[in-house]
Amino acid sequence: MTDASLPTTPHRGSLIEVDARTRRRNAAEKRFRLYGLVALGIGLAALVILLTSVLSNGVSAFRQTSLVLEMNLDAAVLDKKGNRDPEEMKKVTTIGYGKLIDKALKEAVAAKGIAIEGLTDKDVANMISKEAAAQVRERVLSNPDLVGETVTVKVLANGRIDGYLKGRVTMQSAERDSNVTPNQLRLADALMAEGLLVKAFNWDFITGPDASELRPEASGLGVAILGSAYMMIIVLILSLPIGVAASIYLEEFAPKNRWTDLIEVNISNLAAVPSIVFGILGLAIFINFAGLPQSAPIVGGLVLTLMTLPRIIIPTRAALGAVPPSIREAALGVGASKMQTIFHHVLPLAMPGILTGMIIGLAQALGETAPLLLIGMVAFVRDFPAAPPEGFFDPAAALPVQVYNWTQRADPGFAERASGAIIVLLVFLLVMNAVAILLRNRFERRW
Amino acid sequence: MASVKFTVSALALAAAATAADARDQLQIAGSSTVLPYSTIVAELFGENFDFPTPVVEGGGSGAGRKKLCEGVGETTIDIANSSSRIKQSDIDLCTTNGVTEIMEVRIGYDGIVFASDINGPEFAFTPADWFSALAAEVVVDGAVVANPNKSWTDIRADLPAQDILAFVPGTKHGTREVFDEKVILAGCEATGAFEAFKTVAGGDEDAAEEKCMALRTDGVSVDIDGDYTETLARVDANKNGIGVFGLSFYQNNTDKLVVATMDGVVPTVEAIAAGDYPVSRPLYFYVKTAHLGVIPGLQEYIDFFVSDDVAGPDGPLAEYGLVSDPELAATQEMVAAGTPMAPLN
């Protein structure tokens, strides 16, 4: 240490006047902040574009157009023998019911004095959804005494008419569209003025099953929501105990040697494996080898469990590791066994972190599509699965796969449904993430 | 091996006892062209019969037939939908896996149409035009050269002046097979290029055919591996493009697409039924006869599918775009009797 190392000349810069080097440094910082702002702006813009496109296309799926009709349930057609036996009445198919509804609408049009030039009987009949006959048939079969009476029915309107009320179909497009005529749209206007055509909240979109290409207006998410819920139950009951037990063992008990190192590396790698790989694995093991049924939530749940496990083990281990050693040492110091230390002191403190990891893992599994495509969850399923546990083995759909499924259909009505389904899926994901954040903020402790 | 199986089964919920007993709903997989028809029938079947609604999956004709041939039993599918006829290799696979008898049911015909953006010009094509537009090599003044055509007017002066751009189904689609055979190959023969290729190949017809069906790779012919909604999106984004669609898809989107005529014939259900429109193909499904009487509702489903109410000219399938089979009565008889298909000839 000599004085020679100290600056001999005084610093020439001034605090008031900024020198060139400082200016450069300040400019660099300013630029960097700007880059950050631009990046943030692009990110936000992408989010806004995504959300507006989904919302503008999908919100209309939550409202649906129906026809309210006075309908005479003609006993001569529906119950020829007149004994009101549901078994006998089942012989009348939806085709028979369809004709009765067509007649009811035609009479209603005539009774209201709606006259439109060039309106054909076929135009009138096509105002009604193909689903309508099934709706009425089901109602009559569950209550055979209705036969012969005149009842008020509320049946779905055709998808194109629904599209007209929602602005998807216009007079111009109807001129060129072979599935709808401008006269039908005029009739729709007239019926709306008479209060026979009404738009209401579409509960069937959330609770009803999927429908075929001929009736986009009847399709719903019920089976898909139930299928996704079943899969999440399976993922939860399998991956919570397995994931937590594996984490506790690895974090607290396992000796540090080459084997545990290898396992750790593998867990980290598995978390990054593309999900489609788990789908191929699931197809080979659970369906082809173990003989489990196709399209069933049990297989989907097992595949998603495999995929979610490493993603749960990693945050769980982090949560356990974040509990300070002083707590363990204190517990051991007063004579607790290792197991008592972990279960009485470490685990409760790590629980918020574990639950957060679990919920985020589940949310990821809920949005997963690729592995489900391989195990037959992409099928057209109309019947609701039974209650668990038998229902785990019944065919079902899944929410993200339903979105994929609907975007492939020809009728433009399904595009609206697909966006609607995305909204439902996003709501579920938002709720799950909100719960995770809530748990973290409410219970997490910092040391 | 047994221990692996045990572990897996144990993992498949320790309560393996709760596993579903006999499967009670039909399982169907295969062609995405037949899929909409299949779901329409499945839906009607479910609401009118006491059986559960069949589960219908897409996946492609080839994949469906392969699944059908995986074996006999509850974990295998009952019916494979197919937009092309079953191949000998499929039948061999079936035989190897113990599926000795299958029933072939032809449900009707499907047209393949060429359509472009509604605001663009209308086209009147012949197969020869398509060959000249899309083939990798064509014959100009007697010499085989790489395809020089840029605009439709290069091919025929009376076609609209629009750059050639075509969205054709990818090779995994059953539709591509029909497109290759009935449009490109037919056009190849019509332009006389087939003979020229044959001469170049030293009289080898197979080599000439292959050359006919080789499409150009300079971005003018774009393979679409997705479904028709993707083709529609591409046509929408690129107004010069002409897409290859199924008739039923076009009929559901007539407000966005204008259809081209082929050999002067407008593709309609009637024109295809009469055999006037040249680009059409039969659609099939294949039934595993060993499952008849075992899986409840299978016989009823196939009877219902081919009934006049469903597959007839006024039925819901025709309404969606299926061209009903004039020989439907014979099919109904065959299905009712459960006659398995004869060996392919």
Image: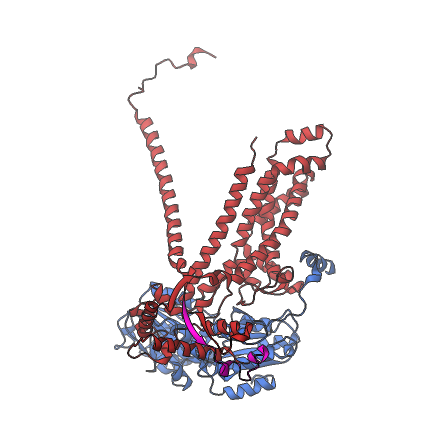
Chain colours: A red, B blue
Residue at (58%, 56%) from the top-left corner? A231
Residue A120 horizontal side relative to residue B343, left or right: left
Residue B217 horizontal side relative to residue A395, left or right: left
Is residue A262 visible from the viewing direction of this image?
no
Image quarter (top left, top right, bottom left or bottom right) of the C terminus of chain A: top right
Residue B278 is inside the magenta segment: no
Q: Quadrant of residue A142?
A: bottom right
Is residue A375 visible from the viewing direction of this image?
yes
Residue A77 is inside the magenta segment: yes
Most foreground residue, A107 or B134? A107
Percent position of residue B136, x then y: 38, 71
Residue at (56%, 60%) from the top-left corner? A227
Spot the residue most to the top. Answer: A3
Compared with residue B171, is residue A318 higher up or lower down, i.e. above or below?
A: above
Q: Quadrant of residue A157?
A: bottom left
Percent position of residue A30, x then y: 34, 34
Q: How many marks?
A: 0
Percent position of residue A357, x then y: 56, 44
Percent position of residue A66, x then y: 41, 67
* Segment colored magenta: A66-89
Most foreground residue, B11 or B277? B11
Most foreground residue, A259 or B70? B70
